[in-house]
Image: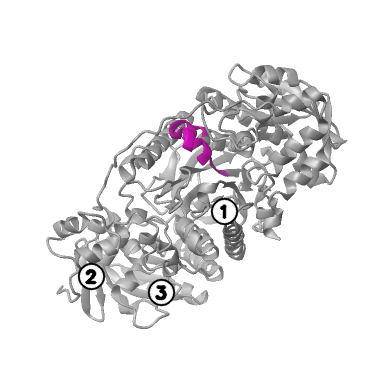
């Protein structure tokens, strides 16, 4: 068709975010100069956020092998794994970091909405959502407190309104996140395998249908906005931040799932980053067919919108469907019933071109795969950052025990437990609806959360974890430790881990040190998943997480899902009832270290190595043993050891029991000597951090089962007891009042949400 739009220029391309040489690449692909509309489309699709141009070649090396795999990374809107003969679990995590830094409420809310659409476009009904958050220190910065409150409210309001349980999450505070917070959202859904949807268009002669909210100018250039550093200027780009409506999304979800269940949909994709250009070009490119769009038919809520604005708008709660012409009346009837817009805006055509028309005139006509598959692919220069070592060894606990100073020890532990990185997360998750849907088995605040699989006796365990503190010290090993911790969270519930999704939050990839962190962390993550035989099924890359203050800690976030054959075997983080004392065991190879620990961070020491020892054979043996013990009904409660070490795990187990029963239990550590011998010091034993290890509570009658499960890769050591009453932590001859420690732990974040 004859193009009527004016030609775009190289200067305009750079202003829209194209890098040096990329305008020439476009001209080379097209054999002509692009129109301005085409250039704007390239700016979205060739942005870092959409094209993954600086990461895709490395991501293709990720471990993703499984006989349960139904959708591999990048093939569909989300990854999918078979969980039984009839059902699949569908899950993914994505970032909404830059929008949340500029407009935290809408940034976080639309992040949740976007990841929800990725799940239900697969034909899966979301059963749970989780989040991973990073902020500066709220004790020192007023804007951080504002961002924290508004992000949490945005997550809660959207998920609660949509009717999806917010089942879990994690949060970490560090000064590098002050200007550039990280907001990662994960959603897990369940689908009938025979009714799952695809994004691949099957051929020409089909109708292209727009459904959902009307299009406006919000979110234009959102993908480009997310593909550059935050600055004073970019923080003013509020037009790049979308506005969400969860009540409308609920209607879109129900109507979409109804159409998929009725098998009215041939292909479907969410209009997420880069909006209509992304969904149309990716669907056309994956199906190897052409698509013609007539933009005057797009439902709009603003007048005078130009073709490039229609194509790049990131207005929320919109989907693009491809259907048979004969299905149109049935599709229209479904969306009319839900009082939603549905309009035929184009058709699939012979050939492979994406053709954009408006009022009979053509503004873009180019092969779809140039937009979706021919973006430049780079492997950037790397520069290794040496691991720093040599931190001093703290002996504050040892000194207090030697002096018999219960007050001093209480003060030290209270200081640690009240720190934002170690205190209770209840002030956050109590703002979320964690019970809606009546699927919850284990809720937030424990290890992994557990939800029932609909129409099945089985359950899904899920967690989300990240440790930028470790990655900043040693990205390869830190990533392996992060995967291992996420697997332990799942194993602690008794579930078998089956798949991983990731959100890779890093700084500017054009800086060699930053790219080295990225490449090392991705390699470490993949190698760990290969060892566990846990496939990476989906993910997201978020570069340019830095501001004028510098880069954030490199933060790969890992979401892991596990499967319990029987929901009744799920193991909580606290005993359901404490009518009699329980034996406490430390299970797994216990080799804690103080370096790079939260103990050192709270005490003002820099993060240096070495990181905790990691033996993948021990992790694998431990996860298998935990699943076996859970199936045997041997465990009353289990918590994996992570940040804050054994001391925090002991307190969390006691505090969770108190919050469920209203009566504070007592804990006595009777074998501190053996712990100190294993750790090389009492401070390291109690506050150091370790891989491989779980704190277990068992009824006396089940102690033999624990002993029988012990191996050299999964040793078991009885360390004390958990009593129904007492309200004290007895440790090395001192008795500390749990009420004092609980007060510190429970109030650490409370003041920021009053």
Query: Which residue is pictured at 45% across the width and 58% down the height?
Result: 98
Residue 479: within the magenta?
yes
Query: Which residue is pictured at 41% across the width and 65% down the height?
Result: 264
* Nearer to the camera, 458 or 648: 648
- Distance between the alpha carbons at the discs numbered 2 and 1: 39 Å
**Relative height, residue 322 to residue 637 (above, below):** below
Q: Disc 2, disc 3: CB below 8 Å?
A: no
Per the image, the residue denoted by label 1 is 129
Q: Disc 2, disc 1: CB below 8 Å?
A: no
Give the farthest residue toward the left. Answer: 31
Answer left or right for 296 relative to 342: left
Query: How was the colour assigned to the protein in this rendering?
Result: one colour
- Disc 3 on helix, strand or loop? loop
Q: Say how many tags the image has.
A: 3
Quadrant assignment, res 225? bottom left
Give the farthest residue toward the bottom. Answer: 303
Nearest to N terminus: mark 2 or mark 1: 2
Residue range corresponding to the magenta coloring: 463-481
| Residue 3 image position (x, y, % from top left) | 17, 73
* Nearer to the camera, 285 or 447: 447
* Tag shown at residue 36: 2
**Relative height, residue 216 to residue 164 (above, below):** below
Q: Nearer the viewer, mark 2 or mark 3?
A: 2
């Amino acid at each position: 068709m004859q193009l009527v739009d004016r030609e775009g220029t190289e200067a305009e391309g750079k202003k829209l975010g194209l890098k040096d040489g990329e305008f020439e690449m476009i001209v080379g692909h097209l054999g002509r100069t692009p129109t301005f509309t085409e250039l704007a489309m390239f700016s979205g699709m060739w942005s870092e956020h959409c094209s993954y141009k600086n990461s895709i070649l490395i991501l293709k090396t990720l471990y993703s092998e499984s006989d349960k795999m139904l959708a591999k990374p990048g093939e569909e809107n989300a990854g999918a794994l078979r969980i039984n003969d009839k059902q699949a679990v569908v899950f993914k995590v994505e970032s909404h970091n830059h929008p949340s830094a500029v407009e935290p409420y809408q940034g976080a809310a639309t992040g949740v909405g976007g990841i929800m659409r990725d799940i239900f476009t697969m034909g899966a009904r979301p059963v749970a959502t989780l989040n991973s958050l990073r902020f500066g220190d709220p004790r020192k910065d007023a804007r951080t407190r504002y961002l924290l409150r508004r992000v949490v409210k945005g997550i809660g309001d959207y998920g609660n309104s949509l009717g999806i349980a917010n089942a879990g999450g994690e949060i970490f505070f560090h000064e590098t996140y002050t200007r550039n917070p990280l907001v990662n959202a994960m959603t897990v859904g369940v689908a009938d395998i025979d009714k799952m949807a695809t994004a691949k268009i099957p051929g020409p002669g089909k109708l292209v249908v727009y459904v959902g909210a009307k299009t406006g100018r919000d979110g234009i250039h959102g993908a480009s906005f997310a593909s550059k550093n935050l600055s004073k200027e970019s923080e003013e780009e509020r037009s790049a931040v979308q506005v969400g409506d969860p009540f409308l999304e609920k209607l879109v979800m129900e109507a979409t799932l109804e159409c998929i269940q009725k098998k009215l949909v041939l292909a479907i994709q969410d209009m997420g980053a880069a909006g209509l250009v992304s969904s149309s070009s990716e669907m056309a490119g994956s199906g190897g067919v052409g698509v013609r769009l007539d933009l005057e038919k797009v439902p709009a809520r603003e007048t005078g919108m130009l073709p490039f604005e229609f194509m790049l708008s990131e207005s929320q709660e919109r989907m693009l469907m491809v259907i048979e012409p004969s299905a149109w009346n049935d599709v229209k009837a479904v969306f009319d019933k839900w009082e939603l817009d549905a309009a035929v805006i184009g058709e699939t055509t012979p050939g492979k071109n994406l053709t954009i028309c408006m009022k009979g005139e053509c503004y873009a006509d180019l092969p779809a795969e140039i937009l979706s598959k021919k973006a430049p692919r780079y492997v950037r220069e790397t520069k290794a950052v040496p691991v720093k070592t040599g931190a001093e060894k703290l002996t504050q606990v040892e000194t207090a025990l030697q002096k018999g100073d219960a007050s001093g020890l209480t003060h030290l532990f209270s200081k640690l437990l009240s720190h934002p990185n170690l205190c209770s997360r209840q002030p956050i998750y109590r703002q979320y609806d964690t019970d809606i849907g009546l699927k919850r088995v284990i809720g937030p605040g424990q290890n992994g959360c557990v939800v029932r699989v609909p129409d099945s006796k089985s359950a899904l365990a899920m967690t989300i974890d990240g440790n930028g503190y470790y990655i900043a010290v040693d990205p390869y090993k830190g990533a392996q430790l992060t995967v291992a911790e996420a697997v332990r969270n799942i194993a602690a519930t008794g579930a078998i881990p089956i798949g991983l999704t990731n959100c890779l939050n890093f700084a500017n990839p054009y800086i060699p040190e930053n790219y080295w962190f990225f490449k090392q962390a991705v390699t470490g993550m993949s190698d760990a998943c290969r060892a566990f035989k846990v496939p990476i099924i989906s993910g997201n890359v978020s570069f340019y997480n830095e501001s004028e203050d510098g880069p954030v800690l490199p933060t790969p976030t890992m979401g892991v899902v596990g499967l319990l054959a029987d929901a009744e075997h799920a193991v909580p983080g606290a005993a359901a009832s404490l009518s009699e004392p329980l034996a406490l065991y430390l299970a797994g190879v216990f080799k804690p270290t103080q370096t790079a620990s939260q103990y050192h961070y709270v005490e003002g020491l820099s993060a240096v190595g070495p990181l905790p020892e990691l033996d993948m054979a021990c992790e694998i043996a431990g996860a298998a043993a935990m699943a076996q013990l859970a199936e045997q009904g041997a465990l009353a409660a289990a918590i994996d050891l992570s940040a804050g070490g054994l001391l925090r795990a002991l307190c969390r187990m006691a505090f969770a029991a108190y919050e469920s029963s209203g009566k504070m239990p007592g804990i006595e550590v009777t074998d501190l000597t053996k712990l100190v011998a294993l750790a090389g010091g009492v401070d390291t034993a109690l506050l150091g951090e370790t891989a491989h290890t779980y704190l277990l509570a068992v009824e006396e009658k089940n102690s033999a089962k624990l002993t029988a499960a012990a191996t050299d890769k999964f040793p078991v050591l009885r360390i004390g007891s958990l009593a129904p009453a007492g309200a004290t932590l007895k440790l090395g001859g001192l008795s500390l009042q749990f009420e004092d420690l609980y007060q510190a732990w429970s109030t650490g974040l409370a003041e920021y949400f009053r």
